[in-house]
Amino acid sequence: MTAWIVAIDRENPQHREYAQQYGYWDITVARPFSPGDVLYFWQARQSLLGSVLVTRGTAELAPGTPMPWNLDDDKRGAYRCRVEFEVLHASSVGHPTWSELRRATGVRVSPNSVPRVPTGGGVCCTGR
């Protein structure tokens, strides 16, 4: 199991609510999420929002796959992969700042700097 911090951009905070409602998160850059991993949602310039347990790892999206955030996101054509999950915690007990979280965990990079899977030969995702 790996724990990940998944950033939600400040322009679209409603995406986390969509994700909890539908049980998946679409991403623009492949990440090696695997079943059993825990994703902690982080709202940009705010704090932790809750956590989920990955049930189906990163998988490539077929062209034209419907997305509930399609209508309100300027990146709608950039989503390439999907990870499915079940909600562990719909909200966060605490709301640490990024500096507090870094001190408590030892994480030294921003939430948008998590490891990325190279995208070569037209393959976006790990196919798990």
Image (cartoon, grey):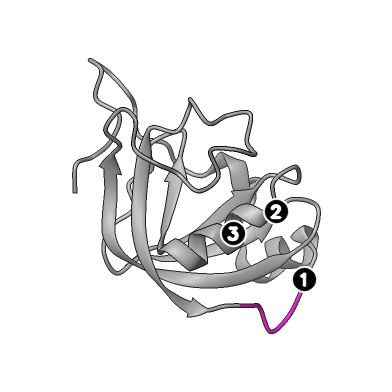
Q: Given contact means CB atoms under 8 Å apart, are the residues at marks 3 and 1 in contact?
A: no
Q: From the viewer's perspective, is the residue at label 2 or at label 1 nearer?
A: 2
Q: Given contact means CB atoms under 8 Å apart, are the residues at marks 3 and 2 in contact?
A: yes
Q: CA distance from mark 3 to mark 2?
A: 6 Å
The residue lying furthest to the bottom in this view is 93
x, y (%) of residue 120? 27, 18
- Where residue 16 is drawn, which disc sits there? 3
x, y (%) of residue 73? 62, 36
Does 99 appear above or below 11? below
Badge 3 or badge 1: first in the primary sequence:
3
The amino acid type, in three-letter code, at marker 2 is Pro
The amino acid type, in three-letter code, at marker 3 is Arg
Q: Quadrant of residue 100?
A: bottom right
Does 91 appear above or below 7? below
Q: Which residue is mark 2?
A: 13
Residue beneath the point at 63% across and 78% down: 91
Q: Residues within 10 Å of mark 1 (few under 14, many from 20)?
A: some
Q: Which residue is mark 1?
A: 96
Residue beneath the point at 55% across and 45% down: 69
Q: From the viewer's perspective, is the residue at label 3 or at label 1 nearer?
A: 3
Badge 2 or badge 1: first in the primary sequence:
2
The residue lying furthest to the top in this view is 121
Q: CA distance from mark 2 to mark 1?
A: 17 Å
- Where residue 43 is drawn, which disc sits there? none
As helix, strand or loop, the secondary structure at mark 2 comes to loop
User: Where's the N terminus, which quadrant?
Assistant: bottom left
Q: Quadrant of residue 67?
A: top left
- Please say whether residue 74 is one of the residues in the magenta stretch: no
x, y (%) of residue 89? 53, 80
Q: Which residues are magenta?
A: 91-95
Q: Residues within 10 Å of mark 3 (few under 14, many from 20)?
A: many
The amino acid type, in three-letter code, at marker 1 is Pro
